[in-house]
Amino acid sequence: VEIWQPDSAGRIPRASGSLRRDGWTFTGWGRAATDAAGHYTFTTVAPGATNGRPPYFAVTVFARGLLDRLFTRAYLPDADLDTVPGLAGLDPQRRTTMCCVAETDSGRLRYRFDVRLQGRGETV
């Protein structure tokens, strides 16, 4: 799983992503492998709104058996998806598959984003 994202002020980084981090340069990019149960994690800043559109993480899924990678976006829980071109006409039930779920763990805010490749609740 890869993510691309704007910084907390909504700026899209121009620095190239890297598997080797220096500890302070925000590249807006990350890659994580899934475990045997399909779980993955990223530690990053919450993205800010870009050009008046809701904050998001761009998500790319790579998997054995896929001929090409898959793309979606993970919007923060309270995102107004009516403001996103191309999503306003999408069935609201389908749009919810593109929203993170906010969770609190030991007082820290976390976002969960489940990717479903097919079937009921398939991610747009």
Image (cartoon, helix red, strand yellow):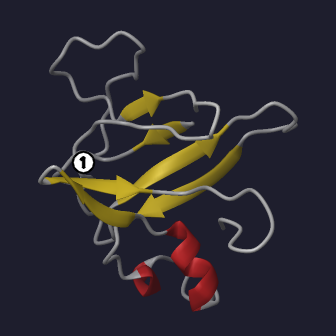
Q: What element carries label 1?
A: loop
Residue 103, image x, y percentages: 29, 62
Quarter of the image with the N terminus in it: top right
When asked about the image quadrant of residue 43, the answer is top left
- Say left or right for 98 vs 12: right
Residue toward you, 35 or 121: 35
Residue toward you, 118 or 21: 118
Residue 39, image x, y percentages: 54, 41
Residue type pointed to by label 1: Arg
Vertical side of 103 occupied by 9: above or below: above
Residue toward you, 15 or 80: 80
- Say left or right for 105 vs 53: left
- Name which residue lies at 22% across and 44% down: 45
Label 1 crowd bin: few (<14), some (14–19), many (20+), radius 10 Å: some
When asked about the image quadrant of residue 52, the answer is bottom left
The residue wearing badge 1 is: 11
Vertical side of 77 occupied by 92: above or below: below
- Say left or right for 56 vs 1: left
Quarter of the image with the C terminus in it: bottom right
Residue 117, image x, y percentages: 74, 56
